[in-house]
Image (tube, rainbow, N blue to C red):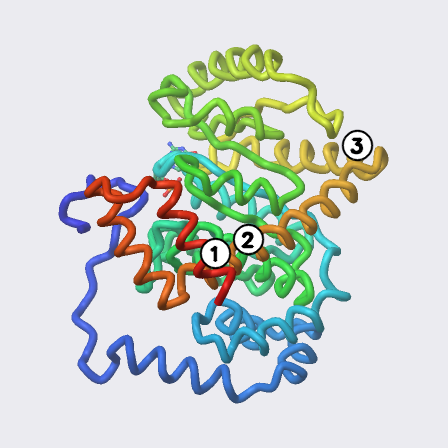
């Protein structure tokens, strides 16, 4: 894949050597599974709340596991961590590939750790496969942050549905907070549904954009602009500074056209250069201003309560669907009825009804 990508692509892969046969991925998976089985949920909880990052990683592996036997243990750990979570600010960061998300998170994360914050970086990447996907997959993209003792970087969970991947990230936030991380950054690619999922789990939503490319060109949908608490124009350096300033005026104008937010916050537009670390501090100040406003007017807590209810409902929805589609007789009847519908032997509605009848009667 790397051969087809331009040299400066955000998705570049470093050339590597062939892993020896002895380190094949199934052996690694088996090793990780054995290791994660060693700790009881109670031990994991105890270790997590004293800031043990290894225990945190093991608990996240349980949360991400597709093995049903792990679900119960994962739930016990999450439940045990819950009283220690919540003391944080959760920030969502979105933008199309190449806009500079990783570079920005590296620069922003370093600023935060220099201020004494503990920063966890998570990602939601529905395109991520079992071999770990594009976002944060290559940890070398955050070289400094990854070495920082006060930072924790975890690539996106993999999974078949966005809902599943997002739920795992949502649960991972709780674990990170219990482990003492007070600033949670959740990264996603701004091209699909994933930013709606991120928006439903963060306090502040930041859209990274570039100057000089129309929104359409950048693939940013109106809905994403509308969700943003801040639009940050990155790469405002060198010859780009003037263009970035012009874009700032335009985005300000565009944001004014959206209805007022329930938080009472007026979304702000800012410019920065993630590479030169300029404008980054202003963005943190902006987020502090947002916190001051929303914590004093009650919106911060209200939004978190609503998000928790949303995730309860999402989890039910996801599980009901899984239970339905994993039912062997249902799966068979769906195949049969699809053929029958295609051949006009039965109406789509009658076909659906017969499948639902089978489910509710069984
Ligand atoms: P992502 O795909 O959104 O995570 O983007 P990356 O952080 O990987 O950055 C994509 C490319 O843009 C890389 O070549 C970066 O070096 C470059 N880049 C990122 N931030 C800046 C910036 O502030 N200024 C300039 N000039 N280049 C940047």
Q: Is disc 2 surrounded by few (<14), some (14 to 19) or many (20+) residues within 10 Å?
A: few
- The answer to which of 278 and 286 lies nearer the viewer is 286
Closest to the observer, 212 or 312? 312
State which mark lies toward you, 3 or 1.
Answer: 1
Residue found at the far left of this picture: 3
Q: Is residue 298 above or below residue 249?
A: below
Q: Residue at label 2?
A: 317
Looking at the image, which is closer to me, 190 or 355? 355
Mark 2 falls on what kind of element?
helix
The verdict on label 2 being within 8 Å of ligand 1 is no
For marks 2 and 3, give the one nearer the viewer.
2
Secondary element under disc 1, as helix, strand or loop, is: helix
Q: Position of residue 297 (x, y in %)?
A: 84, 33
- Pick whichever, 121 or 73, lies toward us: 73
Q: Residue at x 53, y 44 (%)?
A: 197
181 horizontally vs 167: left or right: right
Disc number for residue 321: 1
- Compute the Cα span from label 1 to label 2: 6 Å
Quarter-wise, where is residue 348 in the image? top left
- Name the residue at 69% across, 34% down: 285
The local secondary structure at tag 3 comes to helix
Residue 220 placement, left or right of 178: left
Residue on which disc 3 sits: 293
Drawn side of residue 120 relative to residue 80, left or right: left
Residue 271 point in image, percent of width and height: 53, 25
Is mark 3 in CB contact (under 8 Å) with mark 1? no
- Asked if the residue under mark 2 is in contact with the one under mark 1, i.e. CB atoms within 8 Å, the reply is yes
Residue at image location 51% in from the left, 26% down from the top: 223
In the image, residue 153 above or below residue 39: above
Residue drawn where x is 67% and y is 61% of the image: 177
As measured in the structure, the alpha-carbon distance from the residue carrying label 3 to the one carrying label 1 is: 39 Å
């Amino acid at each position: 894949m790397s051969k087809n990508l331009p040299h400066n692509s955000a998705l570049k892969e470093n050339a590597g050597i062939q892993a020896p046969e002895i380190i094949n991925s199934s052996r690694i998976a088996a090793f990780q599974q054995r290791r994660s089985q060693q700790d009881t949920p109670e031990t994991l909880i105890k270790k997590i709340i004293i800031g043990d990052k290894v225990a945190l990683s093991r608990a996240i592996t349980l949360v991400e596991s597709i093995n049903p036997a792990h679900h119960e243990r994962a739930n016990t750990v999450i439940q045990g961590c819950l009283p220690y979570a919540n003391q944080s600010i959760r920030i969502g960061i979105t933008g199309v590939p190449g806009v500079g998300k990783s570079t920005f998170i590296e620069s922003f994360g370093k600023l935060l750790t220099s201020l004494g914050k503990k920063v966890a970086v998570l990602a939601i990447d529905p395109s991520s496969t079992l071999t770990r996907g594009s976002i944060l997959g290559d940890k070398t993209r955050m070289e400094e942050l990854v070495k920082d003792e006060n930072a924790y970087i975890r690539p996106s969970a993999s999974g078949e549905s966005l809902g599943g991947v997002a739920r795992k990230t949502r649960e991972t936030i709780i674990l990170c907070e219990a482990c003492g991380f007070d600033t949670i950054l959740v990264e996603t690619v701004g091209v699909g549904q994933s930013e709606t999922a991120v928006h439903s789990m963060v306090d502040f939503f930041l859209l990274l954009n570039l100057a000089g490319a129309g929104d359409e060109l950048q693939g940013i949908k109106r809905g994403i602009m509308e969700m943003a608490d801040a639009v940050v124009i990155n790469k405002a350096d060198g010859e780009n500074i003037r263009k970035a300033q012009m874009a700032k005026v335009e985005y300000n104008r565009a944001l004014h056209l959206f209805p007022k937010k329930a938080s009472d916050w007026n979304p702000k537009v800012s410019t920065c250069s993630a590479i030169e670390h300029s404008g980054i501090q202003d963005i943190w100040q902006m987020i502090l201003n947002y916190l001051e406003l929303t914590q004093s007017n009650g919106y911060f807590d209200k939004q978190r309560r609503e998000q928790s209810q949303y995730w309860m409902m999402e989890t039910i929805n996801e599980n009901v669907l899984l239970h339905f589609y994993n039912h062997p007789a249902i799966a068979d009847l769906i195949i049969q009825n699809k053929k029958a519908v295609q051949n006009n032997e039965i109406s789509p509605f009658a076909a659906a009804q017969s499948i639902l009848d089978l489910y509710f009667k069984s």
